Amino acid sequence: MSDELSRPRIIAGNWKMYKTIEEAVSFIETLAPLIGKSQAAVYLAVPFTAIQPAVACVKKLKAKITIGAQNMSDAQEGAFTGEIAAKMLVEAGAQFVILGHSERRYLFHEGDAFINRKIKRALKTRLEPILCIGETLEERNDGQTEAILEGQLLGSLEGLSTDEVARVRLAYEPVWAIGTGKVASPKDAAVAHRFCRNVLSDHWEKGLGDKVAILYGGSAKPENAPDLLAQKDVDGLLIGGASLSAETFSEMIK
Ligand code: PGA
């Protein structure tokens, strides 16, 4: 647990569009013995095709790894070629879903209102949403980081009750740090996380911000993980590139 309020510690891998079924299964077989009795919850957001085989592999090995997805549709079902529904993810064994990742926001033009509908759908379907938020370099240089974070939080979580917001995990991922090798300083990450907590407490209910787990993401690696995780407002990591090797990923879990 990351603090006295019992927020979970979560080390999550986001594989993006990497790993076939065979590669996913072999990764989990390598990772399972390496994580041992880790105190942190280990999450893996795998490609859709690998969800079911990954869940089966985790079960077989009795490994404490939670499998999830990287995106989903806002609709319950329908004529949406190429989309995937929350209930399909649940049926495949997914327990969480990453929503609003910056690659979805910027490459696929997803906005807060759309992400908001996905969050609501995930909660209704009992999938745990991990909502990603974060500013671009230009926005940071313009001194807009807080305005961007607040706008994304209020837009993506609009209409949710306090209890519902408490079921959402956040990932603060500065866009300029994703896949660039430029990690946010532990202090900058801590300041952003604290700011997000204050937004939740101010707009929903006093104290809510301290109940929500907030992960940091963006070029997290074994070398910078300890300093980031030492910040009391950083509850875990969402890891892209460094989650693709079981050895590297397990170092960060330890
Ligand atoms: P990165 O990606 O660790 O490769 O920077 C993080 C993410 O996109 O979630």
Image (tube, rainbow, N blue to C red):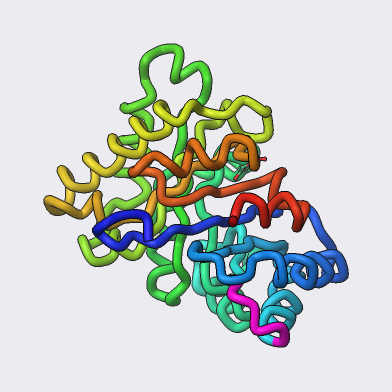
Image position of 203 (left or right of 116): left
Q: Which image quadrant is residue 64 in?
A: bottom right
- For the view shown, which residue lies furthest in the bottom direction? 60
Quarter of the image with the N terminus is bottom left
Q: Residue at x 66, y 52 (%)?
A: 251
In this orientation, does residue 137 appear?
Answer: yes
Q: Is residue 62 magenta?
A: yes
Image position of 197 (left or right of 225): left
Q: Position of residue 118 (x, y in %)?
A: 46, 60
- For the view shown, which residue lies furthest in the left direction? 206
Q: Position of residue 54 (x, y in %)?
A: 72, 75
Quarter of the image with the C terminus is bottom right
Q: Which residues are magenta?
A: 60-66
- Front-most of residues 40 and 243: 40
- Front-most of residues 171 and 226: 226
In this orientation, does residue 78 appear?
Answer: no
Q: Residue at x 65, y 84 (%)?
A: 62
Q: Residue at x 32, y 27 (%)?
A: 147
Number of callouts in the render?
A: 0
Q: Position of residue 48 (x, y in %)?
A: 70, 67
